[in-house]
Image (cartoon, rainbow, N blue to C red):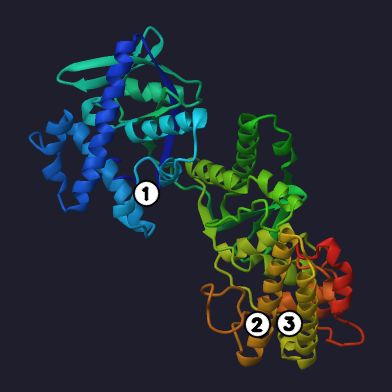
Amino acid sequence: MPKGKDKNASFRGVQAKLRFSSQGNRKALLDLMRRFSSATRFAYQRLLEGYSREELKREDGPLCQLFRLNTRYADEAILKAKAVLDSAEELGVDPRKVVFGGRGLFEQLKRKHLSGKRLLQLKREWREKRQGLLYSRGDRSKGGNLNLRLEVEDGALWLRINLGHRAHIRAFVLSSHPQVKALVERALLGEPYNVELTLRNGEVHAHFTWQEASPPIVATKEQGVLALDANAHPYHLALALVSPDGELRHHFTIPLNEVDRAPNRGAKEIVLWRVAHEVVDFALSQGVAIATERLRYLRKSRRGDGSGRRFRSIQHRFAYASLLQKIHALARRRGVEVLEVNPQDTSTIRMLKYAPLRSLSKDTAAAYVMGRRALGFEEELPQSYGRLLEDPTFLSDAQSFYEGLLKDLEKRREGENNPYLRRKLAREIGKTKQALGLLSSLRSSSGSQRGSTEGRNSPGANPWRVLRVGLFLPLLGREVPRDLSPLKPILLGGPWEGGKVRLRSSSWWRAQGANGRFE
C-alpha cells in the first residue's frame, strides 16, 4: 500500500474476470504470473536468510535477472513475500514451515490416497495457487498503475498488462460489480489503484482495490451511542439508544427473517446491506456513535461434537459477523464513529440485572449493557446480589445441587453406548465441574465486584458468573432461561429463603435431562 496511509481510511474493491483476444496473449500472461509467483517464493527464502529489500529489487539483482522481471514487479514480489513472513510471525508459525499454495493441499497430495478426477482437480488447484499470482501497486505519479493499467476505449474497460522489455498485452475486464463506475472514474483521473491477478479454475480473476479518505466524523459518542445485539431465535437485531449519562432512551428490533428467505448468497448480501443502511441511517439521524461487540472468535460447531443438529442449523444461518462488517464499513464511510466493545460477561449481566429489573428482552438488555460499556460505565454488583453471595445457605444449596447433578451425569455417561451422546454428556460434566469450581472459589476469594474482568484468568471469582451458575440452572431450570421474572424479587432486595425460593434438586434435572436443558 502507499506510504503514509490513513488508518481510518476506507478501502473499496472490484472483482472482475479477464477475457483475452487470443490464446497467445493468455499464455504470455500465465507465463508472467508463473515467473512472478516463483520470484515471490525466492524472495521469501532470501528474506529468511537476511537479505534486504534493496539488495533483492535492484536491476542487476537476482529477481530481475533470474525471473526476467522489471524492478517494479520485483519490488512487488518482495512485498508479497514480506507480507507472508509478517503474517507467519504474527500467528506464531515457524516461517521456515510456510507452504506456498496451502499446507492443506500439500498434505492431501503428499498422502497419495486419491486418484482419478479428484486427484487431477487437486493438482490443478495446487498449480494455480503456486503459479497463478501477479500484483502491482497503484502510483499516482505513474497515472494510476504502471504495470497493470486500466484503459477505457469505446465504452469498454481494458487492462493493459506490462510484460517487460517494452512488450504488453491487453485483456477485456468483465465485471458487474456496483463499484465499477467508481473504478473507471479513478482510472480516467489517474488516481492510484492496486491490481492483483489470480488464477482459479482455469480463469484469470482480477481484484482492483483503492483507498479513500474517510469523511469527517459527524456522529460521535458525545451525543450517546446506538448499541446492537443479534439473536438467533427469534432471528432479529436488537438496538438500544443510550444517552451520554447511561440511560436507555429508546429501543427497537429489526427482523432478520428475510435473510433466511433469500434464494441465494447474492440476495442474502443485499438484505444484510439493507439492514446495515437502516442502522447507520438511524445513528446519523440521532447524531450518535455505533457500538458493537468485538467478535474475535465465533464458535464453529460440526457434526459429532455433541452440539445438536438444531443448534448447528441455527448457527449455520447466523450472519452476525457479516452484518457487523457491513455496518462498520458503511458507518466509517458516512462519518459515524464506531466503538467495538469487549463482550465478556455482557450476556450474564443482561440476564441478571437489566432484563428482570427493567422488563427488557435479553437481546435489548445485552445491547443496553454494551452501550453503557462503550460510554465507559462499569456495572456495579447490586447490593441485593452482594448480600446473596454472602449468604451461606445460597452457596451450600447451589453446591449441593451441582454435586448431585455431577453424580447423575457421570452415572448416565457410564451407561451410554452412543458415542455422540457420551461426548455431549462429557461436555456437560465439564460444565458442572466448572460451576462447582466457581462456587468453591468464591468461598476462598472475595473476587471482583465489577461486571467484567481484566482477562480470562483473572484472580478471584467473578461474582456475576457465580450468580449465573447459582441461580439459572438450579432456580430457573435452564442455563439460558427464557423467563427471568423470578429474579426480580431477589434483585429488589428480597431475602434468600429456602422455603420460599427453593433450588431444584438434581433428581428434577435428571427427569428433564432428555429435553436438553444445557443449551
Q: Is residue 275 left or right of residue 18?
A: right
Is 328 situated left or right of 231 in this image?
left
Q: Where is residue 400 in the image (x, y as percent from the top left)?
A: 79, 86
Q: Nearer the viewer, residue 64 or 263?
A: 64
Which residue shows up at 31% across the image and 47% down it? 83
**Circle 2 sits on which residue?**
437
Does residue 314 appear to the left or right of 210 in the view shown? right
x then y, percent, for residue 488: 82, 74
Q: In which quarter of the image is the N terminus?
A: top left
Residue most toward the right? Answer: 499
Q: What residue type is labelled 1?
A: Lys
Residue at which label 3 appears? 385
Q: What residue type is labelled 2?
A: Gly
Q: In this view, does 305 lie to the left or right of 169?
A: right
For discs 1 and 2, the disc positioned in front in the rendered view: 2
Q: Which residue matches tag 1?
A: 7
Which residue: 61% across, 66% down? 245
Q: Is mark 3 on a helix, strand or loop?
A: helix
Asked if residue 488 can be seen in this view, the reply is no
In the image, residue 447 above or below residue 97: below
| Closer to the camera in the image, 141 or 394 | 394
From the viewer's side, name the closer residue of 399 and 500.
399
Give the mark, 1 or 3, whose residue is nearer the N terminus. Answer: 1
Circles 3 and 2: CB distance less than 8 Å? Answer: no
Tell me where residue 272 sits by quadrant. top right
Q: How far apart are marks 1 and 3 (CA)?
A: 44 Å
Instruction: Determine whether 275 is above or below 464 in the image.
Output: above
